[in-house]
Amino acid sequence: MDWYQMLVLAIVQGITEFLPISSSAHLILVPHFLGWTDQGLGFDLAMHLGTLVAVIVYFRRDVTRLLTAWIQSMVAGRRDGDVAMAWGLVLATIPAVIAGLAIGLMGEDMLRAPGIIATTSIVFGLLLGLADARPRRDREPTDLGWREYLGIGLLQAVALIPGSSRSGMTILGGRAFGLSRPAAARVSFFMAIPITVAAIAFEIVLLLDAQTATPWGQMGVAAVLACVSAMIAIHYFLRMLQSMSMMVFVVYRLLLGILLFAIFGWSG
């Protein structure tokens, strides 16, 4: 892979990972449009590591608080809103891990067709718009129960279909269950941590099994670029949600889906 390709893809991953527009779709479409070969598993691993570091560093106080609450719930029997949220995030991760293992073992090539990406971009974009347009709600993450977290987790599992957007589906679920926009975004960011750890573990197993040459230098630069661009995207996304709705992302997804259908049809 040329360095300029690595630069573009790492920045695209960092920006789109936490916005409700599907990073996987963009990592499929950018090489498709530009005629580049697939970036490879090692590069995906590096970018996932970069975005994982970004969300942990940006929310380091919240992550520390929730991790402490989770550990104390098992060691000292602690019971409060932070404990409920921590266990809710664990519960919400289970459906995506199961679905991810199933898709990984069966192969996801059949899900990467432009027509599928276009369809999921449009359909789930419209659902995100509908959930976001509901009357004002101001619940906080600690107000959700295990049923709500499981529901958001199931939506996160659906988001393994390219074009759905993991952040888009989890924000959709949060808004549907009454969270404010910033609160729904925070839940989405927190949910990214355990599922990204699981994805990295799975990719490491596959990478070791493949026994291919590893471009450590490019992977390191890609991880740093993805991390920095992800932190910038998180910061400005949260600021935007203080005064704006999700409509700009809904419109973007609709236009993206229409463009894909116009260029590739269903099968590409």
Image (cartoon, rainbow, N blue to C red):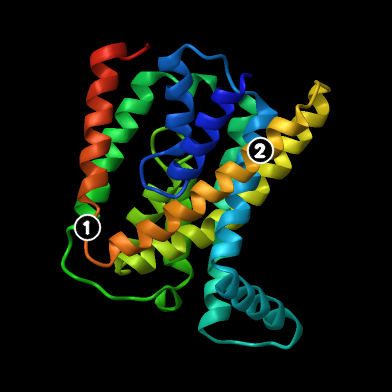
Q: Is residue 177 above or below residue 248?
A: below
Q: In the picture, which quadrant includes the C terminus? A: top left
Q: Is residue 160 above or below residue 39?
A: below
In the shown orientation, is residue 86 left or right of residue 207? Answer: left
Of the numbered discs in the image, which one, if any, rests on residue 245? Answer: 1
Residue 186 figure quarter: bottom left
Residue sitting nearer the eye, 7 or 187: 7
Circle 1 SS class: loop
Image x and y of residue 160, in percent: 49, 38
Q: Could you classify mark 2 by the number of other residues whose Cα lies within 10 Å: few (under 14), some (14-19), or many (20 or more)?
A: some
Q: Which residue is mark 2?
A: 221
Q: In the picture, which quadrant includes the N terminus? A: top right
In the shown orientation, is residue 74 left or right of residue 185? Answer: right
- The residue lying furthest to the front in this view is 4
Q: Is residue 1 above or below residue 6?
A: above
Residue sitting nearer the eye, 236 or 254: 236
Under mark 1, the amino acid is Ser
Image x and y of residue 37, in percent: 57, 14
Q: Please report contact status of discs 1 and 2: CB closer than 8 Å, yes or no.
A: no
Compare marks 1 and 2 and give the one earlier in the sequence: 2
Under mark 2, the amino acid is Val
Circle 2 SS class: helix
Visible in this render: residue 176? no
In the shown orientation, is residue 231 left or right of residue 73? Answer: left
Name which residue lies at 56% across and 43% down. Answer: 226
Visible in this render: residue 131? yes
Q: CA distance from mark 1 to mark 2?
A: 34 Å
